[in-house]
Amino acid sequence: MRADFPLPEQARLTEEIESLALIRDPDSPGWTRRALSEVETAGRREVERRMRAAGLEVHVDGAGNLVGVLEGRDRGPALVTGSHTDTVLGGGRFDGMVGVLGALEALQCLAEAGVRLSHDLWIVDFYGEEPNDFGVSCLGSRAVAGNLSRGHLDRTNEQGRRLGEAMASAGIDPDRALSARWNPGDLAAFVECHVEQGPLLEEQGVEIGVVSAIAGIDRAIVNFQGRRDHAGTMPVPMRHDAACAAAEVILEVERLGREGGVGTTGHVVVDPGAANIVPDHSLLWVEFRSIEQAWLQSARRGLEGAVAEVSARRGVLGEVEWPSLEAPTPMAGLVAKAVEDAAVGLGRSVARLPSGAGHDSVQMASITPSGMVFIPSKGGRSHCPEEFTEPGDLAIGAQVLAATLALLDEMTT
């Protein structure tokens, strides 16, 4: 592999990210651009414009994924890179976007180095990577991996709307999404560049992370149904308080997540929501993450046991639903070696580490060898407006991505 890939212009890449981030929901905090929204559609139109300006042939597949294609010298199975440009509510400017816009910079690096790939190159902006109000993440990559089901589309949000209906309103035919699976024979490998979203690279002073595995993610929805009473006249020992049941379970989730993985209760609803009424209903969205499948199974049992025990003791009805169970995903040795060799060849410091965050790479790993390039996150902050990666680290990430693609092109020919 040649080691003279130019370092992208920091100012140019930073400006590309900053200007896309400005396409955001003005009525929401941070840099919000959630999937299934009009503002997210506007952002994707801008990404499409940039892909075409970079010389790519662009199309939108049946799952809403934006795909830019650069024809290779010998055609054949494609090398694929990219990420997503949707955000969480109140999100930042780097999560996901770095993998899409950084891929366009990597394309420029390849051209400036005089490298024409043998394989076709696909740069993808995957649709709806972040969790939505229906409890389903990675919509676009899940669909191309053949892991999107009718059951996913029939899931409803708190207003009773179906995910399939929301997709149709956003211009995505849900039936086409169900049949949008890519043929694994058309793919050579997938590599995703992403900000770490954690503190390890910065703490260690390392420029590039080579992801060894991605944590499994189990998401649960817990419902408690109690009894509504007057808060001033019903004695506490006689209450069937759904909010107190939820509070106990929230603390149990935290306890379960102290060793071997993490547990988070990120969304809580209490009804009827009045200070003078004993709550008769509560809803929790719980998430467990770990790279150890045995720990995830133990956490599931722990949550279900806690809900059953609290329900019996407090005289409420508790139910647990698991809308999304994702196993830990090891990254392909082929791609990890390419990332590491590319970074070392460019004189960059490297460390191998797992990812606690979920990514489109999880879905892609089920249909093609997949891996990830991590770059540092300032203070490890992510999913918040303060999320930040230094311009120099952004440029290094794009440079290493370009070199990785060139190596994969040689390794898979």
Image: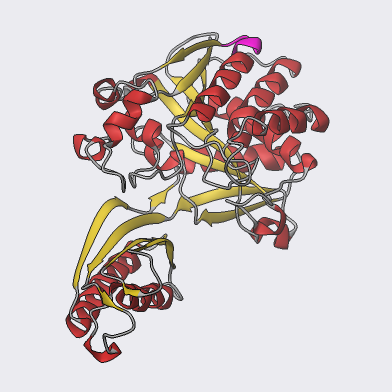
**In front of the other: 294 or 26:** 26
- The residue under the point 58% across, 48% down is 90
> Where's residue 225, x and y in %?
21, 68
Q: Position of residue 190 (x, y in %)?
A: 48, 32
Above/below status of 321 relative to 34: below
Magenta-colored segment: predominant secondary structure: loop
Q: 204 or 298, which lies in front?
A: 298
Tell me the quadrant of the picture where the N terminus can be found: top right
User: Would residue 91 be found to the left or right of residue 346 on screen?
Assistant: left
- Give the side of residue 45 with respect to residue 286, left or right: right
Q: Is residue 390 above or below residue 247?
A: above
Q: Left or right? Give the position of 347 relative to 188.
A: right
The answer to whether residue 171 is visible is yes
- What is the basis of the colouring in this image? secondary structure
Residue 146 visible in the shown view: no
Residue 317 in which image quadrant: bottom left
Q: Quadrant of residue 242?
A: bottom left
Could you tell me residue 396's position as x and y percent? 74, 38
Membership of 394 in magenta stretch:
no
Q: Identify the magenta region.
A: 52-56
Q: How many marks?
A: 0
- Expressed as whole percent of the image width and height from the top left, the position of residue 288 reads 38, 62
In the picture, measured across the screen, residue 325 lies left or right of residue 385, that is: left
Q: Is residue 55 magenta?
A: yes
Q: Residue at x 68, y 50 (%)?
A: 376
Quarter holding residue 293: bottom left
Q: Is residue 255 above or below residue 152?
A: below
